[in-house]
């Protein structure tokens, strides 16, 4: 199987990392729209337009599946991408909510959802988690984490100030949904901040669980072919990919 993975920038690499761990695909084509990141502060129509352009880009490859490794695009543009694509398109929000359901047993658990402004405003996670019976939800847009991660700042003073800025008035959660694929890159700092007992739910692991359930992967690929594309400075993306994916 040949898969396309799409994100606004480098965040989707955190999903690629999970895909590689499970050795699902023979070939992975990654596209990061680095010229236009961040998407999370843009309006719905712009996000849809960029997402359809990504589908057009993927038409250069004969893909079996497109994974939208971006919560913001998954919240707003999945239907439109599907209408324009000849292969199936799956997003990360549905699987994120299901992964939360698998991992969080008490329906009264205090769950904090963090993501971009667009994702939080869409209320996608809240609606799905409410429908699954969870009653104690907090949601916070933490869009500043996106440019910090794009700058490869994963810990230290600036990250701590951003945590203080966003989480000062938040009630201590027992689980945090990392509702942006950039956020697993700062997962260690988030785990230290919220404490070891706090459960972090990660889009990459969530989509891997969903794929395992929905597809019949008879063959596994230990060393898939990986191709990285970006709308701006692809070398920078490839360098980060090398580091993050240990290539
Ligand atoms: N990584 C993306 C997400 O999961 C979007 C970050 C952005 O472009 O603002 O939402």
Image (cartoon, helix red, strand yellow):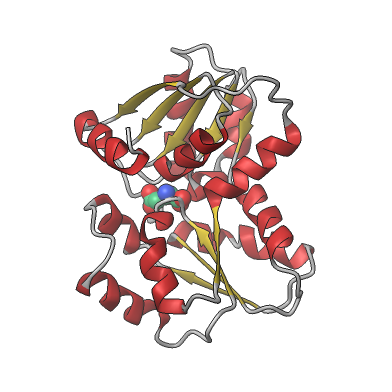
Report x, y in % for residue 223. 45, 22
Quick check: 180 left or right of 112?
Answer: left
| Residue occupying image coordinates x 40% and y 74% | 192
Report x, y in % for residue 240. 26, 40
Question: How many labels sit on residues?
Answer: 0
Report x, y in % for residue 93. 61, 50
| Residue occupying image coordinates x 67% and y 49% | 94
Q: Is residue 92 above or below residue 123?
A: above
- Report if residue 77 is visible in the image: yes
Q: Nearer the viewer, residue 36 or 240?
A: 240
Which corner quadrant of the image does residue 84 belong to?
A: top right
Q: Nearer the viewer, residue 169 or 54?
A: 169
| Residue occupying image coordinates x 28% and y 76% | 160
- Placement of the C terminus among the 4 image quadrants: top left
- Report if residue 9 is visible in the image: no
Q: Is residue 208 above or below residue 129?
A: above
Q: Nearer the viewer, residue 240 or 146?
A: 240
Q: Is residue 246 above or below residue 183?
A: above
Report x, y in % for residue 173. 56, 79
Which corner quadrant of the image does residue 83 belong to?
A: top right
- Placement of the N terminus among the 4 image quadrants: top right
């Amino acid at each position: 199987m040949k898969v396309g993975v799409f994100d606004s920038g480098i965040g989707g690499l955190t999903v690629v990392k999970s895909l590689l761990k499970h050795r699902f695909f023979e070939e992975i084509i990654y596209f990061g729209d680095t010229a236009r990141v961040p998407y999370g502060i843009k309006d719905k129509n712009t996000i849809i337009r960029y997402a359809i352009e990504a589908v057009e880009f993927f038409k250069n490859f004969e893909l079996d599946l497109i994974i939208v490794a971006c919560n913001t695009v998954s919240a707003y543009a999945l239907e439109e991408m599907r209408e324009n694509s000849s292969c199936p398109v799956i997003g990360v929000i549905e699987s994120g909510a299901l992964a939360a359901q698998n991992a969080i047993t008490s329906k009264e658990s205090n769950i904090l959802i963090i993501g971009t402004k667009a994702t939080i405003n869409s209320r996608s996670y809240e609606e799905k988690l409410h429908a699954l019976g969870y009653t104690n939800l907090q949601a916070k847009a933490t869009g500043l984490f996106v440019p910090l991660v794009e700058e490869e700042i994963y810990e230290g003073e600036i990250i701590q100030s951003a945590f203080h800025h966003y989480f000062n008035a938040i009630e201590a959660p027992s689980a945090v949904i990392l509702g942006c694929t950039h956020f697993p890159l700062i997962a260690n700092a988030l785990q230290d901040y919220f404490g070891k007992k706090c459960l972090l739910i990660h889009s990459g692991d969530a989509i891997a669980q969903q794929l395992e359930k929905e597809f019949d992967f008879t063959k596994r690929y230990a060393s898939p072919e990986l191709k990285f594309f970006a709308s701006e400075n692809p070398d920078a993306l490839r360098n980060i990919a090398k580091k993050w994916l240990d290539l």
